[in-house]
Amino acid sequence: MEAYNNSLINCKICPRSCGVNRIEGKLGYCGSNSHYNVSSIVLHKGEEPVISGEKGICNVFFSRCNLQCIYCQNIQISCNRGDVILQVFSLDEVTNAIIDIFETNGINSLGFVSPSHYVPHVISIIENLRAKGYNPITVYNTNSYDKVETIKMLENYINIYLPDFKYSDNKLAKKLSDVSDYFEVASSAIKEMYRQKGSTIIKNDEGIAESGLIVRHLVLPGQIDNSLNVIRHIVDELSPNISVSLMAQYHPVRNLDNYPDLNRKLTQHEYEIVVKELDESGIFKGWVQELESSDNYLPDFENEHPFEK
């Protein structure tokens, strides 16, 4: 607990390295204090099949974010200033809610979504669960804007890394997510995840992943070269043996008239170009989302079950 407090007194958990005292309520880039600010703790069945399985995974959605993607599908909870949907929990309240979902649904998988600015909280939640006799399969579902040293802190806590490799182009990253060094930071963070987990997904008898790395990439309309270069970088600098999850679920969630390409869905032609590159790249493990998925992954966090229609 002392290390937990110290890391929040001079917060440099994520690459923003704001240095604010979150214990005293000072706010850095992410706009988050030291509390357990959670927007939803919910059963989710929409992750990759080896993660969700048939029964689903318990996902903890933290509020706010250390990136500010103008197209974020979780905009209700991710803004770093102003009101967002959240609840302030105690540590026991968080773990008890998780345990209730475990027991009710017969599952043992726990995902942390947008956790980069809440890593000390992630560690405390896992330690608290272990103290209560639970040792879940843990998933770190991140935008990949993470420090290497922070990912190293998680080695004994996280079973599966699920990073989104968003950009190969820093100018695009700055324009769309307000970050000028995304490519270098994300590349290094994912390389450390690969060092820890390798390219093999280890599954249990039910086909649920117990250890591994899955790199996600969301294809953005009008930004096909970005996607092609992300795929090439994975092959050239990481390994073609890594599992890749190619996603087509982009859906404009607000008016983006200043970004006309992002004010529409992905076209079939655009997606076919990226899928072809993936097929010919040497990457042979992973998943390719259906183009029609853009209508199926729009959560509403005002609902108790945000992913249910």
Image (cartoon, helix red, strand yellow):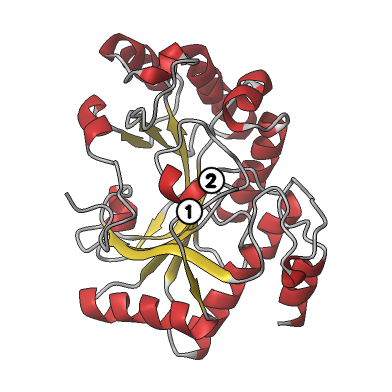
Q: Which residue is mark 2?
A: 79
* Left/right of residue 302 with respect to residue 63 in the rendered view: left
Q: Classify 10 Å Cα crowding around label 1: few (below 14), some (14-19), many (20 and above).
A: some
Q: Which residue is mark 1?
A: 84
State the SS at label 2: loop
Residue 80: x %, y % from top left: 59, 48
Residue 106: x %, y % from top left: 23, 76
Q: Amino acid at mark 1?
A: Val
**Residue drawn at point x = 21 percent, y = 28 percent:** 292
**Residue drawn at point x = 30 percent, y = 14 percent:** 267
Give the Cα distance between marks 2 and 1: 7 Å
Q: In the current view of this chain or complex, which residue is farthest to the left?
A: 309
Residue 224: x %, y % from top left: 46, 14
* Left/right of residue 194 with respect to residue 255 in the rendered view: right
Q: Amino acid at mark 2?
A: Cys
Residue 160 circle label = none
Question: In the rendered structure, are the residues bearing label 2 and label 1 in contact, judged by CB atoms less than 8 Å apart?
Answer: yes
The answer to whether 286 is drawn above or below residue 46 in the figure is above
Q: In the current view of this chain or complex, which residue is farthest to the top?
A: 269
